[in-house]
Image (cartoon, rainbow, N blue to C red):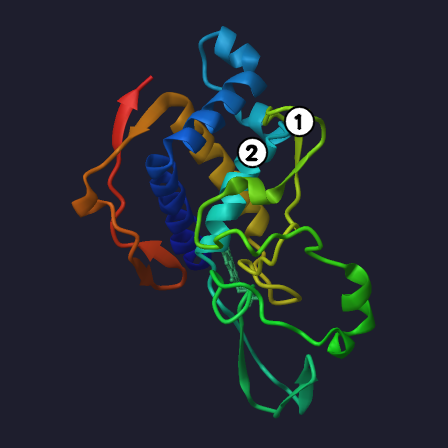
């Protein structure tokens, strides 16, 4: 309960802030939801839990993933024996902090000597299309989308969500990774979709719209004020 409370609510607060400050992304997400749940829209009702659970919503998934990328937390491990990571010697007992990117998760990756990678790492060819020349501090959900056909659509027929498109360690990895991950995605999908379906998130005054965070179990915004207009 403790692990899931602060993290998921903080994540949803960040999404609400990004959608407020990026109205074009907010409108696109709303259009995608209205088109995907066209029956619910025609019947003038909210989508059901079952409808959203089964729906393919790559754009919503990308919005969530991009928020998690920008607000990641480092994962820590203690070396149980003398070892090496990418050729760097690590002594038994050392606390190792893993970031999903380079020196910070909003900076480009560090250059790695490919020969130092393990065979499995080399053959995985992860993140082959990840473009680090684009400012990594910017909120850009399309980083996580692969276009399937020509055009400018954002529905499941137009784009696929690729959660492995770039470096992401926000839920950790391995046997001690977050086991609330799937529940967290489900909760975030439902709540964010309900919010955007029913309300327009209008601009808020700069004095209450900062991006400073509070470090707790996760990093949560110090300020999260919304100005809602019922649709
Ligand atoms: C956006 C939401 C969430 C984020 C970003 C998040 C992130 C994390 C991270 C980074 C870890 C450490 C992983 C590692 O060391 O490899 C973790 C562990 C954990 N999380 Fe989450 N979490 C979220 C939601 C949840 C939810 C909803 C639950 C429970 C329902 C939960 C339960 C746990 C538990 C029990 C652990 C400890 C696992 C272990 O040490 O074996 N988390 N989470």
Q: Residue furthest front?
A: 133
Query: Can residue 132 be seen from the camera position used here?
Result: yes
Q: Secondary structure at mark 1?
A: loop
- Which residue lies under the disc numbered 2? 59
As drawn, the residue found furthest toward the top would be 43
Residue, disc 1? 158
- Residue 231: x and y in percent read 33, 17
Q: What's the distance in space between the residues labelled 2 and 1, CA to CA?
A: 10 Å
Please determine whether, in this image, residue 202 is positioned above or below residue 182: above
Asked if the residue at label 2 sits under 8 Å from ligand 1, the reply is no
Q: Residue 35, position in %: x, y?
A: 55, 17
- First along the sequence among labels 2 and 1: 2
Q: Residue 169, located in which quarter of the rendered image? A: bottom right
The quarter of the picture where the N terminus appears is bottom left
Q: Is residue 198 above or below residue 73?
A: above
Q: Depth check: 207 or 172 in front?
A: 207
Q: Is residue 92 above or below residue 73?
A: below
The vertical placement of 84 against 133, above or below, is below
Q: Which residue is pictured at 61% across the width and 85% down the height?
A: 79
Crowding at dot 1, Cα within 10 Å, few <14 / some 14-19 / many 20+, comes out as: some
Question: In screen coordinates, is 124 left or right of 205?
Answer: right
């Amino acid at each position: 309960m403790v692990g899931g409370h602060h993290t998921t609510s903080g994540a949803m607060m960040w999404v609400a802030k990004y959608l407020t400050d990026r109205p074009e992304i907010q409108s696109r997400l709303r259009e995608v939801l209205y088109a995907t749940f066209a029956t619910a829209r025609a019947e003038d009702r909210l989508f059901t839990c079952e409808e959203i659970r089964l729906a393919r919503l790559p754009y919503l998934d990308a919005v969530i993933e991009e928020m998690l990328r920008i607000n990641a937390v480092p994962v820590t491990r203690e070396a149980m024996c003398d070892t090496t990571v990418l050729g760097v010697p690590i002594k038994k007992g050392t606390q190792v902090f893993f970031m999903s990117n380079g020196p910070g998760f909003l900076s480009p990756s560090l250059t790695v000597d490919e020969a130092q990678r393990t065979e499995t790492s080399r053959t995985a060819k992860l993140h082959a299309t990840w473009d680090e020349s684009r400012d990594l501090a910017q909120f850009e959900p399309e980083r996580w989308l692969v276009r399937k056909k020509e055009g400018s659509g954002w529905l499941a027929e137009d784009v696929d969500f690729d959660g492995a498109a770039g470096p992401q360690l926000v839920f950790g990895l391995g046997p001690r990774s977050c086991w609330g991950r799937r529940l967290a995605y489900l909760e975030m999908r439902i709540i964010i979709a309900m919010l955007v379906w029913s309300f327009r998130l209008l601009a808020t005054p700069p004095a209450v719209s900062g991006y400073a965070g509070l470090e707790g179990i996760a990093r949560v915004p110090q300020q999260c004020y919304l100005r809602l207009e019922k649709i």
